[in-house]
Image (spheres, helix red, strand yellow):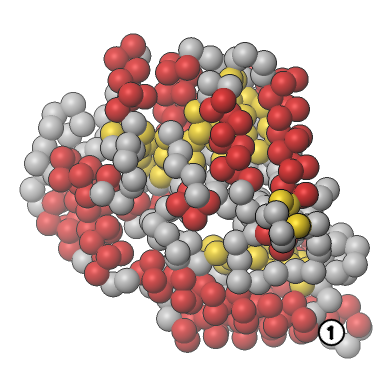
Amino acid sequence: KVTAAAQQQLGRLWHTSNVYMHPGIGPYMEKLCSTLPPPLQVVFLVNSGSEANDLAMLLARIHTGNHSIITLRGSYHGGTQATMGLTSISTWKFNTATASGCAPAMCPDVYRGLWGGSKCRDSPVQTTRSCNCHSDTGECQAREAYLSEFRELLLSAVPLRLAGFIAEPIQGVNGVVQYPRGFLSEAANIVRDRGGLYISDEVQTGFGRLGSHFWGFQSLGVTPDIVTMAKGIANGFPMGAVVTTPDIAACMGEAHNFNTFGGGPLACAIGSAVLQVIDEEGLMQNAEARGTDLMLQLSDLRKEFEVVGDVRGKGLMVGLELVRSKESREPLPPTDMHRIWEDCKEMGLLVGTGGIFGQTFRLKPPMCISQEDVDFAVAVLRLALQRHTLRKSGEV
């Protein structure tokens, strides 16, 4: 259906900038905004997630009159010169954070972080590491410790100059890292109290991938001031968007913003078809059902293999972290990770890797996968892990 929509539009008109209004742009923007809560009702269309986050930075800075933007360590927000300052993962080769006015806060990683918190993450699979929660008050000591560090950064690094805070609802490139429940909503409140804006990067988490909600921030109980999106927005076609409030959008009257291809008729036709297919084929519901089963099956691998340290995620955004041992949590060496990865590829399963040590397999399959696909993926991973165990024991 998406291909047919693209072919039809290609036969009519496919190149014009958003300066020249065409019949598809208005209906598409209305359809996109219908998935978002008010007052997020103003759309800027661009070509990629990097461009979207670049524009979000500009909006935050112009609207607040400030410059500093907080990000989280381990985050990935793009590859342009400006967004490289937001990207804060140690394996990244070049970082312009200081020059670009961006400061990374401690990542509240509930598996590798100083204070844990895994029992408070939104996931059907829990690990044994305590988060020191008080069930009677709902207080999570791990969350409060991470928030304390967050407040300290704001006081020491960006006093009175805070433009905004950007975060992924679940970190993608860093290995599907989830935070203690309530961390992001409280961090957003802290930033807003200091005059900054909260930007939710939904490039990987949006469009129903997390299963329970169309947007990742909706599962966290907080509405951002700016939302950025790309990737799934057009099923692989180069497209991105920034959605914000009328009040924040109005500040662009003080700046120049132009995108030759952003919002062109071909992109809008494809984007509209994507929204239609997600709804008609129940892909968000499929992501929740298949993703939950995938994580539950992967949790069995955690019980079977010493090298499977953690299983985490939500919907069809799943991480499988490999370690030398569950006790040490020391990352599995890159050579071992690569061998397991190659074994999976040879058996017909393609997975991504992530994390600051490259120690996590990232499973983010198409949202239309079947139960048979899930079963096949787990079977291949089990065989690859068995081969690894035999190699280490000298039997292979």
Residue 257 vs 316, above or below: the answer is above
Front residue of this view, candidates 246 and 17: 246
Residue 362 seen in render: no
The quarter of the displayed image where residue 354 is located: bottom right
Q: Amino acid at mark 1?
A: Leu
Residue placed under numbered mark 1 in the picture: 390
Residue 331 located left or right of residue 31: right
Residue 178 located left or right of residue 6: right
The quarter of the displayed image where residue 306 is located: bottom right
Point out residue 266 in the picture as x, y percentages from the top left corner.
20, 47
Residue 233 located left or right of residue 187: left
Point out residue 59 in the picture as x, y percentages from the top left corner.
42, 23
Q: Quadrant of the C terminus?
A: bottom right
Tell me what residue is drawn at x 36 percent, y 33 percent. Answer: 244
Mark 1 neighbour class, 10 Å CA radius: few under 14, some 14 to 19, many 20 or more: few
Front residue of this view, candidates 31 and 363: 31
Point out residue 50 in the picture as x, y percentages from the top left corner.
47, 37
Tell me what residue is drawn at x 30 percent, y 64 percent. Answer: 278
